[in-house]
């Protein structure tokens, strides 16, 4: 396992079929990613049905390409419209849009694409270094696997949003949905109400399409018929030599920051890109240019974003634990294609695992080659009135959901999930814990049951090894942090505000939020 | 901690939050009850009802905590009204800190917004119900035409043309490329037309 495996993965990706579907994935991802409100999570969930007719490796290569394409679509709108496609593109709007306003939209997009490629490259190198440790996870018994899943849930719930009860509600509901169907232990029918459609439980794809896709349609439709946005012009594409030399170090720094942040639960995209932005500003000799079109303000955050999106896959590949909504949807895609994400993937299907990892790199390369020259085409999509796009997306979702099992019941599930996602959106309940709980719920339950069966009902089995004790301790710390976090945040912010308020000559204005 | 955006939302938003918190408490109790009825233990240790019970308790507890937050926020509103400068600015800073994957600034819909959302949801619901009866092509055409006419305010003929176009195109893609078998109408007359 290592660079040799990555190389053989690259060889596998460079087949006409894989390259074609990676290309198609990038294009479809870009098309969906430039739509307002549709980030990578929505794009991947919407487009999962497109991959149903493909073999597992090709399907996952295509989905990875969709993910990166959608992320880059978000960057394009961040630069040319000041609309971040996802929260992690917020930092890019600060200087990318300013560059575009000065007629340098093209160089901003090229620098963003280069940064994404470097970020992806460093992310993949880090992946190769970390992947061998997945063998350790093979030694885990049922209690450790239960605790790892519990830790994932606890950390995600702690870091999701700023409101603990809402995050808990989301996690609890996800867990409840995950229990629907026939119990794997003793075969009891749970919440099935004698409906055969519910015997196998609620399908993940229908739910994620509803909560991420349909809820976004509702959110856009509530605003009424929208005007067509007017993106700034791209003009000249290539960056200057000065742009490239100024971006070199931010590429590296951003990639390293993104890589390590991606390993954290929640894969905090917005925080990562903003941290990278702050770092670049600190190191720059041209601090005054930040916020007015500094190329470093695009290079660092974009590299960080992409490095994060690769490294956030590491916990999934090594432990089988998704750490964000997007990765959770990818985990679902693995399962749909008959693959179990986690250490067993490297043991049982190493070729598939390394081909998918190598495709992260190839997807970014395709984006670099393809999307910069076609930036004007993607922007043209934004000129299509949203009601036509909405109709197309609705048709696609309806059909995509139906094609899962050839059943109208899945459409009803998607509708229910869409209404739920929309209500969550209005009341600011985070969706990530719900999706993660749906995926981790069965793993939690199965390993919990197995642990207690092995220990004959003795709960001490969960603190019987140093690793278990460490995992339990981190779980408890996460819970304590989640409880204290709002109070700590409030305290810090009040102190900051008080300090600002005593400055009589400086008018106090709230921070600008970018919508 | 309830953020300012939640406190500054219109009356309907507060009502929605209260309603959802109440539904969470009641729904959680129902889930917990069902879980308990499935059995919490068995010969191997854990019964089929253990996890549903945990999920139900979690939902109920979080709903109850949410209700407490809403009550506290209502009390705090009175205070904020009398102490406008410091409290509001501090709270707004706090609200703006909440940037993450899920935390997009939500705009609460007006009556027309609710109607538009309701039309889309109803159109999908009806389409799912009539799909086995009138077949895919007619269902999709009617669903899209309804949404385009009532929500997007397109002329009826344009809505119909787009509906037909999207239905036919999507049928070609899914049947031709993905091999998905789409339902034909159960009504013989329509089925004979190939719809």
Image (cartoon, coloured by chain):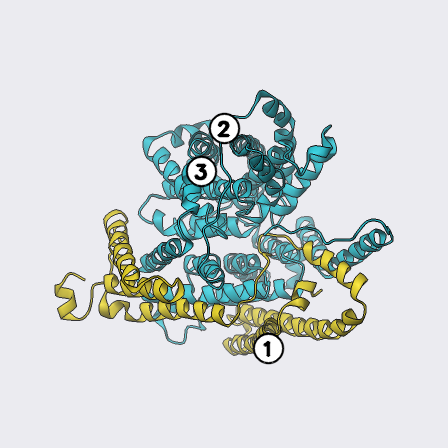
Chain colours: A cyan, B yellow
Q: CA distance from mark 2 to mark 3?
A: 35 Å
Task: Mark 3 vs mark 1: give the one in front.
Answer: 1
Q: Name the foreground residue: A388 vs A335.
A: A388
Q: Quadrant of residue B107?
A: bottom right
The one of A284 and A240 positioned closer to us in this rendering: A240
Please give left or right for residue A504 compared with residue B48 in the image: right
- Find out whether the residues at labels 3 and 1 contact each other: C-beta distance under 8 Å: no
Q: Chain of mark 1?
A: B
Residue that protrudes farthest toward the top in the picture: A241
Residue B91 placement (x, y as % from top left): 74, 61
Q: Position of residue B89 (x, y in %)?
A: 76, 59
Image height of A108 relative to B115, above or below: above
Q: Say the numbered circle drawn on residue A111.
A: none
Chain letter for mark 2: A
Return the residue nearer the eye: B46 or A289.
A289
- In the image, residue B151 above or below residue A193: above
Q: Which residue is mark 3?
A: A356
Residue B22 tag number:
1
Look at the numbered disc 1 and give the secondary structure of its residue: helix
- Quadrant of the image occupied by residue A92: top right
Which residue is painted at 37% across and 33% down in the image? Answer: A19
Q: Residue at x 76, y 63 (%)?
A: B88
Disc on res. A236 = 2
């Amino acid at each position: 396992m290592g660079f040799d495996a990555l190389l053989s993965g690259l060889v596998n990706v460079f087949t006409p079929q894989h390259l074609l579907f990676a290309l198609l994935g990038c294009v479809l991802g870009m098309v969906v990613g430039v739509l307002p409100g549709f980030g990578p999570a929505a794009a991947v969930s919407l487009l999962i049905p497109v991959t149903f007719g493909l073999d597992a490796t090709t399907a996952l290569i295509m989905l990875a390409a969709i993910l990166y394409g959608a992320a880059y679509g978000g960057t394009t709108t961040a630069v040319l419209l000041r609309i971040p496609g996802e929260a992690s593109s917020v930092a890019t709007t600060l200087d990318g849009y300013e560059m575009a306003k000065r007629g340098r939209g093209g160089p901003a997009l090229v620098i963003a694409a280069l940064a994404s490629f470097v970020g992806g490259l460093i992310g993949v190198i880090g992946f190769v270094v970390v992947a061998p440790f997945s063998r350790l996870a093979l030694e885990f018994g049922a209690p450790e696997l239960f605790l790892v899943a519990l830790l994932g849930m606890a950390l995600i719930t702690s870091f999701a949003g700023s409101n603990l009860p809402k995050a808990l509600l989301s996690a609890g509901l996800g867990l409840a949905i995950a229990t629907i169907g026939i119990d794997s232990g003793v075969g009891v029918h749970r919440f099935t109400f004698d409906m055969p459609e519910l015997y196998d439980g609620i399908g993940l794809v229908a739910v994620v399409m509803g909560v991420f896709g349909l809820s976004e349609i509702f959110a856009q439709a509530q605003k009424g018929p929208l005007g067509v946005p007017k993106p700034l012009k791209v003009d000249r594409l290539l960056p200057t030599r000065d742009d490239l030399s100024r971006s070199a170090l931010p590429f590296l720094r951003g990639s390293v920051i993104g890589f390590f942040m991606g390993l954290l639960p929640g894969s905090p995209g917005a925080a990562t890109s903003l941290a990278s932005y702050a770092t670049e500003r600190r190191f720059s000799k041209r601090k005054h240019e930040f916020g007015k079109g500094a190329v470093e303000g695009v290079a660092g955050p974009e590299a960080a974003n992409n490095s994060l999106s690769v490294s956030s896959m590491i916990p999934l590949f090594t432990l089988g634990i998704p750490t964000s909504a997007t990765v959770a949807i990818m985990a679902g895609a693995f399962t749909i294609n008959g693959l179990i994400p986690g250490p067993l993937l490297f043991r049982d299907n190493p070729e598939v695992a390394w081909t998918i990892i190598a495709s992260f790199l190839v997807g970014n390369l395709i984006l670099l080659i393809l999307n910069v020259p076609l930036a004007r085409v993607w922007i043209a999509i934004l000129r299509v009135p949203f009601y036509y796009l909405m109709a197309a997306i609705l048709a696609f979702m309806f059909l995509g959901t139906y094609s899962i099992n050839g059943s109208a019941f899945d459409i009803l599930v998607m509708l229910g999930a869409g209404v739920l996602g929309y209500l969550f959106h209005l009341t600011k309940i985070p969706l990530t814990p719900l999706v993660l709980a749906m995926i981790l719920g069965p793993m939690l339950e199965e390993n919990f049951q197995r642990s207690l069966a092995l220990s004959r009902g003795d709960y001490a089995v969960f603190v019987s090894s140093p690793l278990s004790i460490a995992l339990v301790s981190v779980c408890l710390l996460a819970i304590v942090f989640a409880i204290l976090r709002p109070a700590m945040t409030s305290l810090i912010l009040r102190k900051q505000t008080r300090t600002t308020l005593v400055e009589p000559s400086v008018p106090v204005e709230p921070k600008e939020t970018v919508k | 901690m309830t953020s300012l955006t939640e406190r500054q939302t219109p009356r309907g938003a507060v009502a929605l939050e209260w309603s959802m918190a109440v539904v969470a408490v009641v729904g959680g109790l129902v889930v917990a009850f069902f879980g308990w009825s499935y059995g919490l233990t068995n010969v191997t240790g854990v019964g089929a009802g253990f996890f549903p019970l945990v999920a139900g308790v979690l939902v109920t507890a979080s709903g109850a905590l949410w209700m407490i937050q809403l009550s506290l926020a209502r009390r705090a509103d009175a205070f904020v009204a009398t102490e406008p400068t410091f409290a509001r600015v501090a709270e707004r800073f706090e609200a703006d800190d909440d940037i993450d994957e899920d935390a997009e600034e939500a705009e609460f819909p007006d009556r027309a917004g609710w109607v538009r959302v309701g039309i889309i949801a109803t159109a999908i619901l009806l389409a799912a119900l009539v799909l086995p009866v009138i077949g895919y092509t007619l269902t999709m055409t009617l669903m899209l035409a309804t949404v385009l006419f009532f929500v997007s305010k397109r002329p009826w003929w344009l809505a119909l043309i787009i509906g037909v176009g999207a239905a036919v195109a999507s049928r070609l893609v899914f049947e031709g490329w993905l091999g998905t078998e789409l339902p034909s109408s159960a009504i013989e007359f329509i089925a004979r037309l190939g719809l």
